[in-house]
Amino acid sequence: MIDLHCHIIPLVDDGAENAEAACEMAAHALRSGVDTIVCTPHCNLRGARPNYRGRDYAKCFSMFRALLKQRGIPLRILPGCELFAHRSNLRQLLDSKRVVTLNHSRYLLVEFSFHASGESMTSSLELIARRGLIPVVAHPERYDCVQHDPSLAVCWFAKGYIIQLNKGSILGLLGEGAYHAGTHLLASGIAHVIASDAHDPRYRTTGFQSLLPVLSRLCSPEYIQLLLETNPDRIIHDRHIPAPEQEF
Ligand SMILES: [Fe+2]
């Protein structure tokens, strides 16, 4: 399986707090059948390390890859980021190509403030799409506006944007609102990917072991395969993703 959203690079954001924690997260992922993780540190979050594309990012990423090699942990890691979309600098960041897309594909993982309005989120997503990128909406089920009106996520889906749910939402670990919205989007068949959004080895963890029995009560084996393997694989190889309902 492939985990498309994970804060595993140590000391670059609020994810892995040191090398030990990162290695523990990597080993846990492998034990639960995840062989590939796209590293997605927060990017463009105010008051935090920016993690834009460039020399600093490349250095942190290659140091982490070297660490895994040194420890003998055979996890494949790929570059990416989770772009925090601020209206003030989104256009400039995209035009100057300062964001790390998922394995340098056209797919860009993007997050918003939990309290952002639906209109502002939609207009940021449209701006990203106009630049020739395909937005991957990080955990829409966690946003207030989607929890109040899930049809917003259906609109994004209809525009061809990728809907990525969090493991923790489906497990009920991220609040009732996220649980209800997440399972609703899943039941509607509009989710493309589920990822860990892991931040540490204890609470927001890597791996899908605990998720699989829950998912198997909610969706078919074919859909689970799409969510955890086929679609993430298409994204890292920059391939087209058909709508889930076209696949069965
Ligand atoms: Fe995240």
Image (cartoon, grey):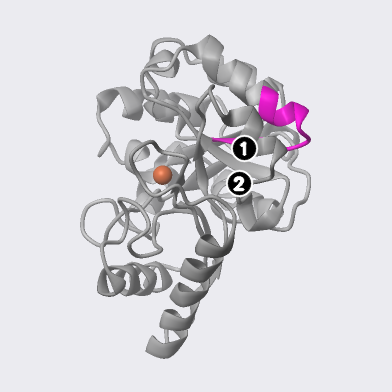
Q: In front: 112, or 149?
A: 112
Is residue 134 visible from the viewing direction of this image? no
Percent position (x, y) of residue 147?
Answer: 39, 17
Quadrant of the image occupied by residue 241: top right
Percent position (x, y) of residue 15?
Answer: 32, 55
242 magenta-colored? no
- Is 127 located above or below residue 105 in the figure? above
Q: In front: 35, or 246?
A: 35
Q: Residue at x 72, y 29 (%)?
A: 129
Q: Which residue is mark 2?
A: 99
Q: Which structural element holds mark 2?
A: loop
- Is 54 located above or below residue 173 in the figure? below
Label 2 is placed on what type of residue? Val
Give the foreground label among 1 and 2: 1
Tag 2 or tag 1, which sits nearer the N-term? 1
Check whether the beta carbons of the residues at disc 1 and disc 2 lie within 8 A of each other. Answer: yes
Give the crowd class for mark 1: few <14, some 14-19, many >=20 residues within 10 Å: some
Q: Residue at x 44, y 73 (%)?
A: 64
Q: In front: 146, or 134?
A: 134
Percent position (x, y) of residue 145?
Answer: 42, 14
Q: Residue at x 52, y 74 (%)?
A: 62
Q: Magenta span covers which residues?
A: 127-137
The answer to whether residue 130 is left or right of residue 21 is right
Residue 93 tag number: 1
Label 1 is placed on what type of residue? Leu
Q: In the current view of this chain or complex, which residue is farthest to the left? A: 202
Q: Which structural element holds mark 1?
A: helix
Percent position (x, y) of residue 160?
Answer: 71, 28
Q: Residue at x 54, y 48 (%)?
A: 224
Query: Quadrant holding ligand 1?
Result: top left
